[in-house]
Image: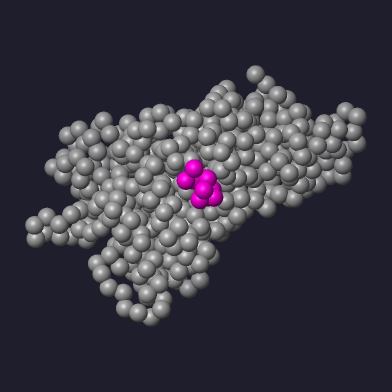
Amino acid sequence: MYGPRIIGRVVGSRFGLLRSSVLALALLGSTAAPAADDVLVIRGVSIHGRFAGGPDIDKGIVIIRDGRIAAVGGMDLAVPRDATIIDLDGGSVTPGLIDACALLEPTDRITAEARGGRPRQPLPPPPDFTEQHADHDDHEGHNHGLDAPPDPRAAPILTWVEEPVEAGGLACCALDTCAMAAMHEFLGEGTICPTCGQVILSEEEHALYASGLAPRTSLVESSSEVVPHTLVIDTINFRSPDFDRLVRGGVTTVFASPDSAAVIGPRGAVIRTAGPIRSRVISDAADVTASFGSDSFRVGPGNQSPFGNFVSNRTRRPNSRMGVAWVFRKAFYDAEKGLAGHAVTGADAPPAEAYELLGSIRAGHTPLRLKARLQRDIEAAVRLAGEFGLSFTLVEATEAYKCLPTIVGAKAPVIFGPIYIDPNGVRGFSEETRESRLSTFALLVNAGVETALTAMDLREEDGLARQAMYAMRAGVSFDETLKAVTLTPAKMLGVAEQVGSIEVGKRGDVVVWSGRAFEATSRPVAVVMDGKIVYDAR
């Protein structure tokens, strides 16, 4: 197997590349260009994903200067002196992968032991830590450390002890500092710990944690079923190990999606998976996601019907698919009344803070996503969107193969996925996955539907690169598959002018593969963002 070679000035990266400087080698038959301070050259690779920039190149060179793609061409392309050179004969390079519907984990729920390492322990406070530091967040102008290295005092908050606490065959997947850990056995399977807020799972259910995400918990605001005025960005831990896993899989940009616990959920965020934290947020208030099907009354604590005279904040609609349609429809009519200055009544009325966003969705100013799996839910979503004249993107669409004419007629783009045989995560608890097909993505593409591919909460062996491999095995061409995880999601997220293809002037976000991308024996050996090596597996 061929291995990459670095020739020239090796710059540092967060993975600890050695800093050194040696003479650059000139390409045979070419004249070296002038030296440059911040230039990365990827040489000897097949180049895919040029799209409008031209056809693929069997063996060529990509030059990234000052974070932007400066040149793409054959092996006769002039290489600047003293550039960092990744020389990978037999490898390939593609644009950075983009997941248009990623569910991010706020903490790492896969134990360090399961990954072959040791659990990370909280760092002790520095010796000079005093009570006056405890209220440092209240100082005027405090920026929460976005521009500074991690504060050791924050380590107990940002660094988790990853071992689950077990009691009587049940386990709490929160921190081992949970004060109720000893009581989890008595709380019982399927209940929620009132202290750490996590579902108590049996040992068998831990197999469903393939993604690292808790399958039945939610981070979505639960005071109402209509919360488009809230933001997913407020839940994101930018130091979560989940970002490392995404980068290792070649994913450089994601839409951070809410889970499906609300009928009309929060606004997602478009973020980059690596780099300085402050520069990683592309949009902190992007699409709103609405959920059809059973998730909105099953994910998280779940909604309840009245039980005698006992009611709680969970005693509310929806409790059925009819209830989902009722809450969705009433939200838009109530927003129309509220914005017109009329009184809004009813137990299912959305909060007043949501009116403006609902009006913006109806006017087409705020993008809307409709998440549905079953044929009946897809058709209900399309019908309700038509009732209000809503433009939308269809998400997940497990049974799209049953209603292709409906989807084609709606002229709605689709974010399809993940592709699986055995569902896990929240899908593992749903009856909505029983009739999934491996060929559905291919049917959507062949029907002319603009379709992106997503891994959602899956990582590693079932991550976005593997999703692309599954799509190709189901009959989708390499070019169409590559577009579905690069340029198409970039267009959906409104960032296609910056990323999504290898073209001069775009961001230097690329993935270097050991072989042809998406083959079973190929893997990312280097991930580059803004011309910087952020992952190096050489």
Q: Residue at x 31, y 47 (%)?
A: 294
Q: Please, which residue is most extreme toward the top here?
A: 1
Tell me if I can see residue 33 in this picture: yes
- In this figure, what is the number of numbered marks? 0
Q: Residue 44 at x, y = what percent?
A: 76, 29
Which residue sits at x=81%, y=46%?
Answer: 36
Farthest residue, direction left: 308
Query: What colour-coding does the image apply?
Result: one colour
| Residue drawn at (47%, 48%) of the image | 394
The location of residue 494, given as percent across then percent down, is 60, 55
Residue 14 visible in the shown view? no
Q: Main secondary structure of the magenta part?
A: helix
Left of 306 or right of it: where is 403?
Answer: right
**Residue 463 x/y as whole percent:** 49, 35
Of 357 and 21, which appears nearest the observer? 357
Q: Is residue 411 above or below residue 286?
A: above
**385 w.r.t. 511: above or below:** below
Res. 359 image quadrant = bottom left
